[in-house]
Image (cartoon, rainbow, N blue to C red):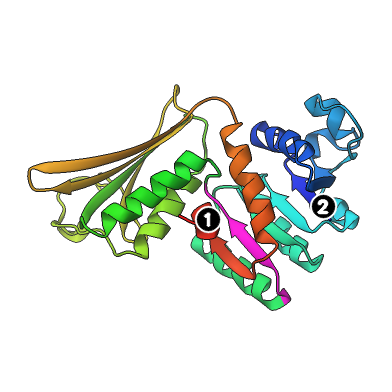
């Protein structure tokens, strides 16, 4: 039986590519979708998708009336948590692709998911190369105690750091905290010049025109260093394959799971 899906943010840059990917997958059925800017229109007319497509809803609550198995949250940080909590009330599993949620948000989402026996898979980045980037960084952190993250994105990106950088810092914290030879309270210079301490990792956010999303995980040892880099291009297509994996995996989960690597055999 096909997995029924509701996609919030279905007409956005990443959401529209994912919607087309869901339509192309024989085991998935897109039964409803959310787009506040195009509410009332058919999804196909907005994303240039042929065939029968649902009418776009203005809210998650309206779209959830279709009783999907999986709710995909691909909107904005200010409504992502409330959308996810509404989905749990409708007995949905939840796939979160929206960046900008913090640790308190995830703790609340986890608690509610556990209470209703539903799974939530929160991914800072669905790109398979980003998943491998994070995994390689975790491997390096087991052997090298000094590291920092540089997070590059466009000048219009409001959330800093990106969801990918947040996810990486969280994953590295499960290995250990990075070592600081000069603690923050002993550092000389303007406050923040050494970046922010996030889950035991120094993170620096660069926001400039010309970037889409890039990250460097830099590991240092005496007389040597290791730089692991992930770079994304202009297309949203790299995120589709990973999101489709997430849809198929989340229905077997209970509670919060962070990162696509947590449900892949890596």
Residue 88 coordinates in the image, percent (x, y): 75, 66
Question: Element at badge 2?
Answer: loop
From what the image shows, is residue 39 above or below residue 200?
above
Q: Quadrant of residue 216?
A: top left
Q: Quadrant of residue 109?
A: bottom right
In the picture as drawn, the residue positioned furthest to the bottom comes out as: 115
In the picture as drawn, the residue positioned furthest to the top comes out as: 210
Q: Quadrant of residue 82?
A: bottom right
What residue lies at 70% left-to-right and 62% top-to-bottom?
251
Q: Which mark is residue 2?
A: 2
Q: Nearer the viewer, residue 197 or 266?
A: 266
Q: Earlier in the sequence, mark 1 or mark 2?
A: 2
From what the image shows, is residue 40 above or below residue 123?
above
From what the image shows, is residue 45 above or below residue 78?
above
Residue 76 coordinates in the image, percent (x, y): 64, 45
Does 181 appear in magenta? no
Q: Image check: 129 left or right of 190?
A: right
Q: Which mark is residue 264?
A: 1
Residue 208 in sight: yes
State the extent of the magenta-drawn residues as a range: 116-124
User: Total of numbered circles in the picture?
Assistant: 2
From what the image shows, is residue 193 above or below residue 251?
above
What residue lies at 79% left-to-right and 67% top-to-bottom?
91
Distance in Å between CA atoms under marks 1 and 2: 21 Å
Q: Quadrant of the N terminus?
A: bottom right
In the picture as drawn, the residue positioned furthest to the left comes out as: 223
Q: Nearer the viewer, residue 177 or 235?
A: 235
Question: Element at badge 1?
Answer: loop
Residue 160 in sight: no
Q: Quadrant of the C terminus?
A: bottom left
């Amino acid at each position: 039986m096909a997995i029924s899906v509701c996609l919030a943010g279905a007409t956005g840059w990443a959401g529209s590519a994912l919607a087309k990917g869901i339509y192309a997958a024989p085991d998935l059925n897109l039964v409803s979708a959310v787009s506040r800017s195009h509410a009332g229109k058919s999804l196909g007319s907005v994303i240039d998708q042929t065939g029968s497509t649902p009418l776009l809803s203005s809210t998650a609550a309206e779209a959830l009336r279709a009783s999907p198995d999986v709710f995909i949250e691909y909107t904005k940080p200010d409504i992502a948590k409330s959308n996810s909590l509404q989905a749990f009330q409708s007995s949905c599993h939840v796939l979160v692709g929206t960046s900008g949620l913090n640790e308190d948000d995830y703790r609340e989402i986890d608690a509610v998911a556990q209470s209703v026996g539903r799974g939530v898979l929160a991914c800072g980045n669905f790109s398979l190369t980003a998943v491998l980037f994070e995994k390689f960084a975790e491997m390096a952190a087991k052997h090298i105690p000094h590291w920092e993250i540089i997070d590059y994105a466009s000048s219009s990106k409001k959330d800093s750091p990106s969801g990918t950088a947040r996810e990486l810092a969280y994953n590295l914290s499960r290995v250990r905290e990075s070592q600081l030879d000069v603690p923050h309270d002993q550092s000389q210079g303007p406050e923040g010049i050494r970046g922010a301490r996030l889950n035991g990792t120094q993170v620096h956010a660069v926001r400039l025109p010309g970037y889409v999303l890039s990250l460097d995980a830099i590991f240092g040892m005496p007389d040597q260093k290791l730089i692991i880099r992930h770079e994304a291009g202009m297309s949203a297509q790299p995120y589709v394959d990973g999101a489709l994996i997430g849809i198929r995996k989340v229905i077997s989960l209970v509670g919060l799971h962070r990162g696509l690597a947590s449900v892949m055999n890596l």
